[in-house]
Structures are given as C-alpha cells and as structure tokens.
Amino acid sequence: MSKQTIIELKGIAKRYVMGSESFYALDHIDLDIYLNDYIAIVGSSGSGKSTLMNLLGCLDYPTNGEYKLKGTDVATLDENHLAGIRNQEIGFIFQNFNLLPRASALQNVMQPLIYRGLPLVERKRRAENALTMVGLQDRMTHVPNQLSGGQRQRVAIARALVTEPAILLADEPTGNLDSTTTIEIMALFDQLHADGQTLIIVTHEQEIAERCHRVVTLKDGHLMSDQLNQSQASSPSFEVNAGV
Amino acid sequence: MSSLKFKLIEGTRSAGQSIFAHGFRSFLTTLGIIIGVASVIAVVSVVQGFSANITQQFDGMGTNVINVESFTPRKERLQGVRAKLTYDDYLQIKYKITGISDVTPTVRMWGSNAGITYRGQTSSSMIVGTASTYQKLNTVYPERGRFFNASDDQSRRRVAVLGPSIMSKLDIKGDPIGQHVGVSGEWFKVIGIAEKRGKLFGFDQDDFILLPFSTTRALLGGAEEPDIIISFQVNEPSQLDQVKQQVTNLLRRNHNLDQDANDDFEIATADQMLDTFDEIIGSTTLVLGGIVGISLLVGGIGIMNIMLVSVTERTREIGIQKALGATRFDILLQFLIEAVFLCLLGGLLGLILGFGAGSLISNLTGLPSATVPLWAVILSFGFSAGIGLVFGIIPAAKAANLDPIDALRYE
Ligand SMILES: Nc1ncnc2c1ncn2[C@@H]1O[C@H](COP(=O)(O)OP(=O)(O)OP(=O)(O)O)[C@@H](O)[C@H]1O
Ligand SMILES: [Mg+2]
C-alpha cells in the first residue's frame, strides 16, 4: 500500500518568550502524516499537543523548521493564502467547541462557507447535510446555549466537516464530554476514517488513543514515540455506529 | 464578483443581528448621529418650507414688478427729517417714463385713527389705499364680489375689498358683500373679498382692507400729503435696469437732490428681494452645516468608541471566524458594514425625528409647513454612511489584523 503524504514536518520548533525567559513548547519535531491517517496525539499536560495542533491548523506559526502541507511550504504563504488553507484544507475541532454564541447551529455550520463566497441556498444545503450527518437534523435552529455539550461538539464537528477538508484536526474533542457522548463522537470519527478522512486527534484518554491507528506521544515538546496501533491498523474490530 | 455579493449580503445580515442583539446600546451609540441628522432635518425642513412659501409669494408678484418707496437714512430720521414720495412723483412716473404699465400708487394707513369698525367690533388691520391695478401687481384677486375699478377711484366711491381675515376679526356673519364697515369714521360698502394667502414671516397676509386711492387720500385730509409707494410693471424685462435708471433720474430731479446727495427713495424688484432672501437662507445653511459637521464628528467618535469596545468583546468570535477561514478583508468588511449599518439606522431615525420636530415647530409657530427636500435626505444618509466608513475603519482594521491564535486565546 503506497501512502500519500499530506503533511511533512521537519525540525519544527515553537519557542515562547516570556519576559527574559524563553522555552520550547515544541522542539525539533519531525513528523509525516499520510492520507487517511487516523492519529492520536497523546502526552501529559503541557507537553505541547495543542501547540502542535495550532501549527498544523495554520492558526500559529513555528519559530523554526519547515511545515509542508500537500507539498507547499506554509511559511511562504501570506495571510490570505493561510486563510484559504484554514477554510479549504483544515477542519478544526476545539476542546471548548468555539461556536459563535449568537448564531444558530445551522448558521454556525454555514459560517465557513461564507468565506468561500457561496450563495445562501448552497450554504444551507451543505450545512443541513453536515448537521444531518452528525444527527442534529432537529436542532438546526438552536443557538449554542440551547444545546447540550455533546450536541455542541457535534455542531462543531459538522462545521469542521462541511468544507470537506483534507485534514480533520480535533484538540481533545471529548475532553468536556461524558463517556456515553464520547463513545458517540468516537463512533463518528471511526466512520469518517472509514470513509477516507484523515484525522488527527489530541486526547488524554487511553480508550480513544486505542481506537486510532497511529499514536504519537509528546513529552516536554519532544516527539517521544510514533507507533502504529497494531490491533487497529490490521483489522478494524470496533463496531462502527455513526449517528447514535 | 458574485462571492463579494454574497459576503455583502451576509455581512449586512450579521450586522443587523448584532446591532439588534444589543438594541439599546446600539441606540445610545448612534445617538450622536440621530441628534445631528435630526437637527439638520428639522432646521432644513422649516427653512425649506419657509423659503418655498416665500418664493411662491414672490413668484406671485412677478419678477418685472418694481416698487419705489421713500427712504430716509437713520441719521436724518433722528433729526426729524422724513423723505416722502408724493402723488406728484406718481404722476411724473406714470406720464414721463416709457416702457412701463400699471403704475399704481399705494398709501398705507396706520395708527390710532386707522381703526376698522363693524357693529361694535373693531380691528386694526392694515388699511391700503390703492388703484385697481394693485390686484394685478400683487396678485390679490377677489374670491367673491369684485375689485374696485378706475371709475370707483375717480369718483372717490366709498367701496372696500376685504382680506379674508378681517371677516372673522370683525365677526361679520352672512354675506359680507353689500354690508358697510367703518374706516376713520366713514362708511365703506364691501364690494369684494380677496383670496386667502396665508402667513408670511408669521404675519397674517389676509388682514387688510383695500380702498380706492383717491378716496383714501380724501379721507386722510389735505393737511399733509401722504407718503406713498409707487409700483409698476416693466413691459420688457430686459429693460429693467434702464427703467430703474430713468426713474432714479426723474425722482432725483423732482426732489431737487444735489449731485452728491443720496437717493431719498429705494427702488426694489421682486428679484432683488428674492436674492437677499436667498442670501440669508444660504448663510443660515452654512452656519447650520458647521454645527451639524461638529455634531456628526462627535457622533462618529461615539461610534468608533463603541465599535472598538465591540471588537474587543468579540475578539474570540473573530478568532473563531479566522480559524474557519475568514480573511482580513472578510473581517474588515463585516465590521465596516456594521458601522455603516449602525450609522444609516441612526440617520433614518434622525430623519424621522427631525421631520417630526420640523413639522411641530412650523405648526406651533404658524410658519409654512415643513418640507424635506430630497437632497437633504440623500445628504443625511450619505453623511451617515460616510461617518460609518470613516470612523468604522479603525475598529474594523483592528479586528481584521488580530492574530488568529491570539484572538482564540483571548479571555
Ligand atoms: N501563548 C503562550 N505563551 C507562553 N507559553 C505558552 C503559550 N501557549 C502555550 N504555552 C506553553 O507551552 C506549553 C505547551 O502548551 P500546550 O497548550 O501545547 O500544552 P498541551 O499539551 O496542549 O496541554 P493540555 O493537555 O493541558 O492541553 C505549556 O507549558 C504552556 O504553558
Ligand atoms: Mg491542549
């Protein structure tokens, strides 16, 4: 099976300067990510997982090193191109959902399509499909504070998916959810992976990491290990139960 | 580009949403604009209503009508000297100046002996002694009955044309035509009622009684010749200046004025009065413009201030939007639309408020009814939108230039 690389990180470092002190939140990370990868990024708190995700999502920029996305060196791109990448290539799911508070579920999911300049009917059609896919077809007009945590996260997932991004980045997507909801969300991710989606998920939870096919471990900004999860990669043994 | 169109539509929708989400705050924010536009519209509507009315009045007078009145400089007036136009001046103009017609002498009676009575009611309305040609020069036509004619004048008949206001002042009931009113102790038969003209500068223009000139002169007695006004029409408008010069020369000769003496009379055309009036309106508008400029500036700063607060408040939202792929331009557009939208709403409110205030003012003061010209409406909206653009650009740029990760981390 020949693997198609979509992300190449070479010697990536992120240094934070605070007053006179400075330290590396990420230090010399080399990482290749392939099409349809299903990666868990684990590591203790403060190990640099979110920092890495923000770099991958083109929300932040590295201090050193090279980040190639689909062969393009991201450092050479200007703000407008980066915005385009965030819009077209990346679907970002945040731990704290980051929904627009005054916008309904439907409006939230339509939001990224505005930046594509799509007409309203088209935005609406796609957003409704995405919301239906995450099982929220009867919650479209609710605003975030009228939704449960799990529902909010599913809106966020629908919003990340509606643009059909090359890579789905999820920073502790189930960190704020109970175990039942977590299982629902993970089933959804399994389904996406089965459909060919590339996913990178930051997690604290062992069970989630075990469902992924590749586990990257960070420690104090260093890449400690990058292992294939044998039981997963060979045969998907978990029941796929999307839209529960 | 169609995608810009959709962004503009969406920007307007979301601007409306966030403006109405904070309705009261938005209202307070635009208060400066509201007050600025309202005051402009109030004053403009009153002034315009006023000036439309006056222009109409002057139009009625005809632009080639000339009025000659006596003029005494203040200094001489203090010394007790009074310039005068006499019946002789009238005759001279009438028979010696060519190219004019409808030369009309007019004498006005004021003061204590100028009371008008009817069945125990008294009115101190203006008493005007004039010739039949007066109606043509001043467009005062009888609505009922008739105007007096040359023969009434020649035979010094005691007939009168009443302004419509007198009717109620004297409490005349029933058909006034053929009834008698008293002027300076003499009885005059009412032969006509003039058309209603309304108010000008707050003065009732219908509060008068017109009598034949000769009759009035006789009434005043021969003790002292009255000061009269001489009006006439210039047949060829192009000869206006020439006629004015001729009249000037004639009157100076007739009054035995020295070479270096000033004219003791004034020649005024309707055009001139209109020009003077336009000048007054113009400078009023200018002063007004200044005041409005300042108030809109203050309003704009208010908008900028609140927009800056709102950008800070929505920092996280901006971060989210950027994470979803909003470009700087998208964010800039969104906040600019919001600022302009806000200002336009303020402008609209101001317009309604201003027109209401203007109508109220004209109603209360008896001025002509307020009108808002289209240019004032367009200007108000244009100005409001401009204020939104100018004062929205700094907050919008601040929002647009936020770093996505910093904005997302903002607490
Ligand atoms: N803006 C910043 N300025 C300074 N230091 C920062 C900044 N952002 C992150 N850090 C530091 O970088 C390190 C890595 O942070 P990061 O958020 O990537 O950790 P994490 O692995 O996601 O942890 P957690 O599991 O708790 O979310 C931490 O020590 C943090 O204090
Ligand atoms: Mg984190």
Image (spheres, coloured by chain):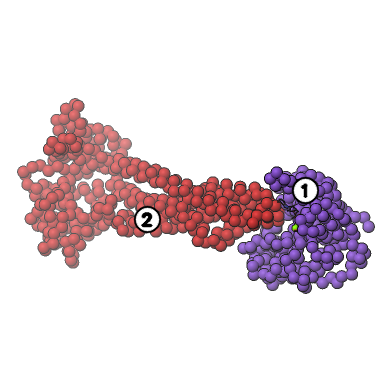
- Could you tell me which chain the residue with mark 1 belongs to? A
Q: Which residue is mark 2?
A: B358
Query: What quarter of the picture does the C terminus of chain B occupy?
Result: bottom right
How far apart in space, not on screen, are marks 2 and 1 (Cα)?
68 Å
Q: Quadrant of residue B18?
A: bottom right
Question: Label 2 is placed on what type of residue?
Answer: Gly
The residue shown at (22%, 37%) is B266
Visible residue check, residue A21: yes
Residue lying at the far front of the rendered structure? A20
Chain B colour in the picture: red
- Could you tell me which chain the residue with mark 2 belongs to? B
In the image: residue B359, left or right of residue B81: right
Ligand 2 quarter of the rendering:
bottom right
The residue shown at (81%, 58%) is A43
Q: Are marks 2 and 1 on the same chain?
A: no
Is B303 placed above or below A102 here? above
Mark 1 crowdedness (10 Å alpha carbons): few <14, some 14-19, many ≥20: some
Per the rendering, the mark at residue A143 is none
- Residue A93 placement (x, y as % from top left): 74, 60
Give the secondary structure at mark 1: strand
Visible residue check, residue B158: no
Q: Which residue is mark 1?
A: A24
- Residue B233 placement (x, y as % from top left): 25, 42
What is the letter of the purple chain? A
